[in-house]
Every structure is written in structure tokens, then in C-alpha cells.
Amino acid sequence: MDAKMQIRLPKEMYEKFKVVADRNAQVPSLLVRKWIEDYIKKEKMKVENINQIIKEVENFKRGLDDSSDPSYIERDYTDGATEVFAEFPVDGAPRLTVVFAEHYHVKEMRNREYDEEITTAEFEDYMQGLNEINDQFDFDKVVGYRWEGSEINWI
């Protein structure tokens, strides 16, 4: 079944478009449908490319750009501990950043602090005891990504 789409554009632009399409023996609606098809194909290819890069990152076949510090993202909850994520640019894909969650043992300690099973000082001591960023974040699994600064796409 076909669907209709209405778009708003300046009348002068519409008139010029009709003239140019007619001059090139093109039907305006066919041109628009073709542009939409091309856009969908392009977006599909982009997502497939991003998914391939993410697999390469998770398999350590593609590195992270560690020339600068990661960005940290916090998700606050009213009924649970804050989740913390690390975001890194990807080598060879400058418009893509990937997001990693904390290891389970770190989340567990964060939850214990939230539930007041341990004090904030005890939690801070635990975090100070982690030697490297690898001890805090799970780099085996990408949990989200950003393309060209967009909102995070959670996986």
C-alpha cells in the first residue's frame, strides 16, 4: 500500500524544482522517492559500518584513540545507584565514539554504597584501589556509541 507525504518548501524553490525536473525529463515525485531510497541505503550502510567497527573494537582488532582522556557519562536513577560509563573515540573512525560500562564488581560496590551497606569512604577506598581504567571499565563489550556528536545510541 502506498503512503503520501507532504513537505513544506518555499514556493519559488518548488517552481524551480519543477522546471529543472521537466527540463531533464524527470517526474518530481519519482526523484523524491529515489532520494529517499538512496538516503535509506546510505543510512543502512552507515549502521552496518558502525556495527562492524564495534565488533573490531570488542575483538581488539581496532584500537581506541587514547590521545586524550575519556569522557565520563553518568546516568542517575531515583531508585538505584548512578551508572558510570567511559566514552572513547575510535582509531581510524574520527566521527565515532564508543561507550563502555563499568565491570560488574564496580557496579556491585556502587550499589552497596547506594544501599548503605558500605560507607562512601569505603567505596572511595575501593575505587582508589583500582590501578587502571581497565580495572573499572569492561572493554570487552561496547554498550553504546555516538556518531558525529549525536545522542548516545545504547546497544
Image (tube, rainbow, N blue to C red):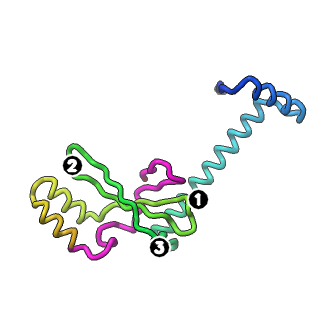
Type of amino acid under label 1: Asn
Sequence order check: which comes first, mark 3 or mark 2? 3
Local packing at callout 2 (Cα closer than 10 Å; few below 14, some 14-19, many 20+) is few
Q: Nearer the viewer, residue 42 or 64?
A: 64
Sequence order check: which comes first, mark 1 or mark 2? 1
Q: Which mark is residue 60?
A: 3
Q: Residue at x 28, y 54 (%)?
A: 83
- Which stretch is magenta? 129-154
Element on which disc 3 rests: loop
Sequence order check: which comes first, mark 1 or mark 3? 1
Q: Residue at x 65, y 26 (%)?
A: 5
Task: Tell which tag, 3 or 2, sits nearer the viewer.
Answer: 2
Q: Quadrant of the N terminus?
A: top right
Element on which disc 2 rests: loop
Q: Residue at x 57, y 68 (%)?
A: 92
The residue carrying mark 2 is: 80
Q: Position of residue 96 (x, y in %)?
A: 52, 59
Q: Position of residue 60 (x, y in %)?
A: 47, 73
Specify the farthest residue to the bottom. 131
The residue carrying mark 1 is: 49
Local packing at callout 1 (Cα closer than 10 Å; few below 14, some 14-19, many 20+) is few
Type of amino acid under label 3: Phe
Is residue 17 depicted above or below 141 in this figure?
above
Is residue 44 depicted above or below 110 in this figure?
above
Is residue 11 depicted above or below 134 in this figure?
above
Instruction: Please indicate whether residue 65 sits to the left or right of residue 138 in the image.
Output: right
Is 137 one of the magenta-colored residues? yes
Q: Residue at x 64, y 44 (%)?
A: 40
